[in-house]
Image (cartoon, rainbow, N blue to C red):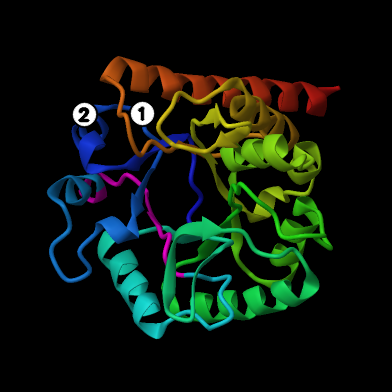
Amino acid sequence: MRPLSGVGLGWRRQLAHYIDTTEGLGFVEVLAEHLDPKGPLPVPLVRLRERGVPLVLHAVSLGLGSAEPPEPRRLETLARLAERLGAVCVSEHLAFVRAGGVESGHLLPLPRDEEMLEVLADNVRRAEAALPVPLALENVASLFEWPSPALSEAQWLAGVLERTGARLLLDVANLHANALNHGTDAAEVLAAVPRERLAYVHVAGGVKHGGLYHDTHAHTVPEGPLALLESLAARVGPLPALLERDDHYPPPERLTAELDAVRGALERGVVRWTEARAA
């Protein structure tokens, strides 16, 4: 996989002009479900590709955690889009989204046990064989957990990486949500991430509501995810991170401030990493 670097931003039509005119973005992530698999690519994405900005194709509907194997039609569509976009990788979620032909409309959590790991590993291998570029897998946020999980989230992610050749897309906003909602040991998860398998990191905003933290992608990034990003960079060194925004799009100056906050967290972490190596 061609390494990513710097701070990126998720492409949305509402942010297309900002992305097109902003200097210094390290890479851009594009939602597969927002693209017409048969029609032309949006012109701003063509311009990004021509400028050499690294592009990642991000999917939400493959359903790698389903009991059924990934649908060949969906894999073919992803593969075709990745080639047309010139994507450096495809990323998807460790979740299930349908069963028996019924769509959930959500990224639902998986039971963290050995049986699920085997099902997931088989589905991931099928996806990897069908895609023309590497696959990265993302941890999800959830408002509930399956009863009595056999594995912690850190053990679960380590098991996924051990059984597949996929990379990890670590979402520190999702990790922050699970730490607040379920008591997930975020430090254990960060310690379990091997740098050589880390593709990139997601950062996003959320809000507390009804006693739970909701990963909305529609609010300013709070301190929690930024602190986790800094801690990760302090352990593994420089890494690529991307800001997601899906609603309540802020004015350009506020969006720039959010990107600067992500960049600042990374820089503080790298300083700590450098000092530790020199000690």
- Residue 1 makes an appearance in the image: no
On screen, 51 above or below 203?
below
Residue that label 1 marks: 24
User: Mark 2: few, some, or many residues within 10 Å (few <14, many ≥20)?
Assistant: few
On screen, 85 above or below 200?
below
Q: Nearer the viewer, residue 76 or 33?
A: 33
Label for residue 21?
A: 2
Quadrant of the image containing the C terminus = top right
Report the mark closest to the observer, 2 or 1. 2
Is residue 111 part of the magenta span, yes or no? no
Magenta part of the chain: 49-62
Label for residue 137?
A: none
Quarter of image, res 238? top right
- Residue 27 makes an appearance in the image: yes
Q: Nearer the viewer, residue 209 or 95?
A: 209
Give the secondary structure at mark 1: loop
**Which percent across, then down, holds residue 249?**
30, 29
Amino acid type for the residue under numbered disc 2: Thr
Q: Residue at x 57, y 62 (%)?
A: 95
**Which percent across, then down, holds residue 19?**
26, 34
Q: Nearer the viewer, residue 135 or 145?
A: 145
